[in-house]
Image (spheres, rainbow, N blue to C red):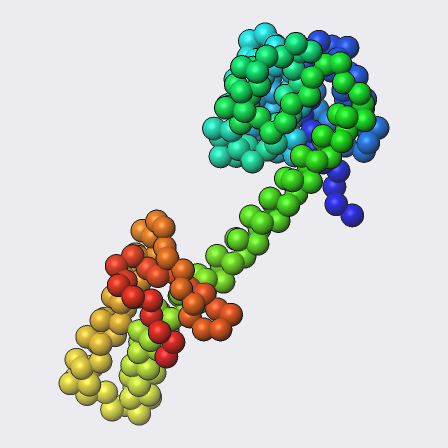
Amino acid sequence: MSDPARILVVEDNDDNRRLLCIYLEREGYQVVGAHDGVEALEQAVAEPFDLVCSDVQMPRMDGYTLCRRLKEDSATERTPIILITAVHTSVEDTLEGLHVGANDFISRPFRQSELLARVRTQLRIKELQDHLVQAERVATVGRMAVTMAHEINNPLSGILGYVEFLLGQLEKGAVAEEVVRSALPRIHQNALQIRDVLTRLRDMSRPAIYEYAAGLEGFTLAGDEEPPTPE
């Protein structure tokens, strides 16, 4: 059973804030209240919320500014925000809310059922977006594994082969200087190849994705002219 959604209610009017909290708590949500945008911003940065319901007209920091600040922060940019507006909201006010990243609006006076329906909709959208983000992370790990296996496997196999050969010679007590002098440069060269791959992975900004084999994808590293082919 998943944990209940956490909702931050931002409202400077004590009665309105308590009423909103009651509506949401009765639906099983975990609700935290904030008196204004400044307090809400501190709470949202300190701990994650699944949704923010905020009044627009508030002292110290209004709802528009709060919305913009939350959307500018990578830690809170995907948190949906419902702005609660006055009954006579102008088109310009609505456009301002959209411009700063509000996900939905609800005007006073509103019905409890309308509020809850909009809350459920935004939470469902966030849940789907979270699933997509998680799926992309899993896919990225898979592509990284394919890329690392392809780019590093050959030089790593070379290093292991030479090391095993030298260890075998040591056990026999027959390691000639010319054998060591022949093997060490090759080991060094393969190690440099691995370091180069890791450097390119570190510096990779927007890698192209290629199909390595059926059902497998990898990253084309910076500097690669063409995607590598399976060996």
Question: Quarter of the image holding residue 50?
Answer: top right
Question: Quarter of the image holding residue 198?
Answer: bottom left
Q: Nearer the viewer, residue 187 or 69?
A: 69
Quadrant of the snapshot with the C terminus: bottom left
Q: Residue at x 63, y 39 (%)?
A: 126
Q: Quick check: 222 left or right of 63?
A: left
Q: Quick check: 44 left or right of 20?
A: left
Q: Residue at x 75, y 38 (%)?
A: 4
Can you see residue 48?
A: yes
Q: Position of residue 95 (x, y in %)?
A: 53, 20
Q: Position of residue 230 (x, y in %)?
A: 38, 76
Can you see residue 66?
A: no
In the image, residue 58 above or below residue 76: above
Q: Quick check: 126 left or right of 184?
A: right
Q: Residue at x 26, y 59 (%)?
A: 223
Q: Position of residue 57 (x, y in %)?
A: 61, 10
Give the number of callouts. Answer: 0
Q: Nearer the viewer, residue 161 or 140?
A: 140
In the image, residue 47 above or below residue 173: above
Q: Which residue is most to the front?
A: 91
Q: Nearer the viewer, residue 163 or 148?
A: 148
Q: Residue at x 56, y 36 (%)?
A: 78
In the image, residue 166 above or below residue 223: below
Q: Nearer the viewer, residue 32 or 126?
A: 126
Question: Quarter of the image holding residue 26?
Answer: top right
Q: Position of residue 62 (x, y in %)?
A: 57, 13
